[in-house]
Structures are given as C-alpha cells and as structure tokens.
Image (cartoon, rainbow, N blue to C red):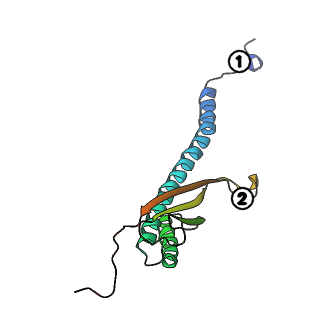
C-alpha cells in the first residue's frame, strides 16, 4: 500500500523546536539569576560607600548631634548615587572608648549601615512582599588626638 493511509510520519524539524524550548526554559532562570547578582552587587557597592561616607561625615561634624544628621544625609546620598533612592536605611554609630562623647580625644567612631535590595522580576504573590537581600557594611574612623580649635589665637 502506497496510499495516503500508510505514509510514515516525518520527524524532521522537531529537534529545532525542542532545542528552542529547552533554551528558553534555561535562559529565563539564568537571566533572572544574572539580574539578581547585578542588583545585589549594586546594593553592596552602595552600602559600602554609604558606610565610608557616613563615618567621615560624622567625624568631621562639630558635635555628635550634627554628626548624626550629617551621617544620615550622606548615607542616603551615597545610596542614591547607586540608584537605591527608595532602599531602607539604618545608620548606627558607636564610639570607643568614650561612648557618650564621640568627638573627644582619641575616640574611634564605627558606623554600621544596614539596607536591603529587592530581587528583580519576582512577584509579590510568593509571600506578601518581593524577596529581598539584606546588606550591611561597617566603617571605622579614628578621631585625631590633635584637633583644630576655633576661637582665640594665643600670641
């Protein structure tokens, strides 16, 4: 029988379709992983720069209260430079050996910045809010023993 009923089915072209679908199924998760790594790296750069800048701003401020304000402003600006304007920010300042007065003598100021970045392209249906990655950085700055004193100049 050589009629239309006994014709064998031809499989040519099906490998191309299978490879295409397999490529798409593997490419989408790889692309998400790559975008997530870039987002976390951007956040890590931002948090590190924020800690360094906040510690320096606190050390250069004339008082502890002014230092707190300056550290917060500078840390927010450093995160904004990395495109993390809306990222949550926590600035914590500790001083040793004078915890009550960070700007005395030979204090050492440590500033810890905590933030997080949301992972891209993840729906919020997975648990209330988008999955995020927590980031933190600490920077330490010593206050110099010899500080500039403004006011009267001795003759």
Image quarter (top left, top right, bottom left or bottom right) of the N terminus: top right
The mark found on residue 29 in the picture is none
Which dot, 1 or 2, sits closer to the camera? 2
Single out the residue that lies furthest toward the left. Answer: 155
Of residue 18 and residue 63, the one placed in the foreground of this image is 63
Residue 120 appears in view: no
Of residue 119 and residue 154, the one placed in the foreground of this image is 154
Q: Position of residue 103 (x, y in %)?
A: 45, 72
Of residue 128 and residue 79, the one placed in the foreground of this image is 79
Q: Residue at x 75, y 52 (%)?
A: 126
Q: Secondary structure at mark 2?
A: loop
Give left or right: position of 151 versus 51.
left
Q: Position of residue 152 (x, y in %)?
A: 30, 88
Give left or right: position of 105 versus 42.
left
Which of the 4 image quadrants contains residue 115? bottom right
Residue identified by numbered label 1: 8
Residue identified by numbered label 2: 129
Instruction: State the CA–CA distance, disc 1 to disc 2.
Output: 54 Å
Residue 40 appears in view: yes
**Relative height, residue 86 to residue 12 (above, below):** below
Single out the residue that lies furthest toward the right. Answer: 5
**Relative height, residue 125 to residue 106 (above, below):** above
Image quarter (top left, top right, bottom left or bottom right) of the C terminus: bottom left
Quick one: label 2, few (<14), some, or many (20+) residues within 10 Å? few
Q: Position of residue 119 (x, y in %)?
A: 61, 53
How many labels, in total? Answer: 2
Lower position in the chain sequence, tag 1 or tag 2? 1
Q: Residue at x 76, y 54 (%)?
A: 127
Single out the residue that lies furthest toward the top. Answer: 1
């Amino acid at each position: 029988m050589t009629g239309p009923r006994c014709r064998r089915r031809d499989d040519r072209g099906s490998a191309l379709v299978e490879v295409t679908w397999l490529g798409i199924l593997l490419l989408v998760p790889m692309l998400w992983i790559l975008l997530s790594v870039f987002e976390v790296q951007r956040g890590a750069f931002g948090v590190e720069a924020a800690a360094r800048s906040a510690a320096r701003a606190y050390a250069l401020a004339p008082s502890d209260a002014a230092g707190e304000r300056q550290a917060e402003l500078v840390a927010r600006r450093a995160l904004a430079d990395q495109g993390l304007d809306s990222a949550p920010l926590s600035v914590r300042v500790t001083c040793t050996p004078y915890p009550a007065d960070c700007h005395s003598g030979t204090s050492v100021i440590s500033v810890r910045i905590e933030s997080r970045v949301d992972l891209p392209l993840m729906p919020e249906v997975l648990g209330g809010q988008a999955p995020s990655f927590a980031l933190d950085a600490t920077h330490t700055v010593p206050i110099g023993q010899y500080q500039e004193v403004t006011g009267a100049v001795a003759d």
